[in-house]
Image (tube, rainbow, N blue to C red):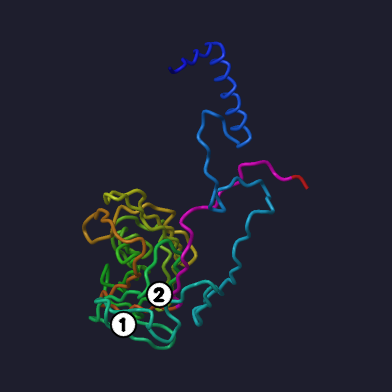
Amino acid sequence: MNQMIPPTPRKFRLGMLCTIGLAAIAAGALLGFAADEPAKPAATPTEARQWHVHDRERPQPPVVTPGTFSTQEQPGTPPSDAVVLFDGKDLSKWVDKTGNGEAKWKVENGYFEVLKGSGQISTKDSFGDCQLHAEWQAPNPPVGKDQDRGNSGIFLMSRYELQVLDNYQAETYADGMAGSIYGQYPPQVNATRPPGEWQVYDVVFHAPRFNEDGSVAQPARETVFLNGLLVQDDVSLKGATAHMTLSKYTKHADKMPITLQDHGHPVRYRNFWIRPIASEHPVAPELPGIKH
């Protein structure tokens, strides 16, 4: 016959529960979290931890040798970590508009020039978040007016156009002049030099981010300097640029080629390079400074 186990007294059961609970709280304290909070996973990315001000354990940034500045007579040299898209000799980093054939634009004297009717050209490689440097020159003497004057364009990710146009003492619509994000944002100032002189673009571009359903999680952002003057200050793009319409975003790859436009004018380019950049800013310190 089975013997019945007498029930545990209620006070004893409560005491045991309290003991177990206190033990769990103590263990949680040792592990760095409260008993009623889930354990925090260990920080895997270096920047995920909380840094002290002037923390000497914080990793050093990579060393990059800066490039040199250009003159009208001579292009500068790119920084040591740049992807050089034109070395002054050939268009081996570019393909024609079909993506299959060789780029047919003219190369001579350290620059390459739009060959009218040959179509746009694109980089063989694809890029997302980047710093872009490009130097361009409108034809001299100038021919035409409005948009029919030294017209080309630099398309980041093959769809977001930074306008190239001769706007030196020449009028056109504001969101279609040099320094504009075409059809969206006029430049803050008209900083163009006379035709025949080299113009300089320095661009910081952050690619858009998309949700799985194709909606925009984060629009593209762009900062542009033209000839050393700020003309676009971290603007949020409305979508792909287009003529006479405000396009919407269409989900695309994280990285895409750079494309240059053939608009029928012999615009020249030189000293064309790009640097992929981090998509996130470094984490600012959240703890007091270390005492020395």
Question: In the rendered image, which quarter is residue 136 located in?
Answer: bottom left
User: Which percent across, then down, holds residue 231?
Assistant: 43, 59
Image quarter in which the N terminus is found: top left
Specify the segment rendered in magenta. Answer: 271-290
Front residue (pair 124, 1): 1
Q: Residue furthest right?
A: 292
Q: Looking at the image, which residue is at 63% across and 60% down?
A: 60
Q: Looking at the image, which residue is at 44% across and 18% down?
A: 2
User: Which percent across, then down, holds residue 176?
Assistant: 30, 62
Q: Is residue 53 left or right of residue 155?
A: right
Looking at the image, tell me whether mark 2 or mark 1 is earlier in sequence order. Answer: 1
Residue type, mark 2 in image: Trp
Q: Main secondary structure of the magenta part?
A: loop
Task: Give me the disc on residue 167.
Answer: none
Q: Looking at the image, which residue is at 60% across and 36% down?
A: 32
Question: In the rendered image, which quarter is residue 132 located in?
Answer: bottom left
Residue designated by label 1: 103
Q: Is residue 178 left or right of residue 33?
A: left
Front residue (pair 2, 47): 2
User: Which percent across, then down, holds residue 31?
Assistant: 60, 37
Task: Give me the disc on residue 136.
Answer: 2
Q: Tag 1's secondary structure?
A: loop
Q: Is residue 206 left or right of residue 73?
A: left
Instruction: Sort mark 2 into few (<14), some (14-19) or many (20+) by Cα contacts within 10 Å.
Output: many
Q: Nearer the viewer, mark 2 or mark 1?
A: 1
Q: Residue furthest front?
A: 1
Distance CA(mark 2)–CA(mark 1): 18 Å
Question: In the rendered image, which quarter is residue 50 located in?
Answer: top right
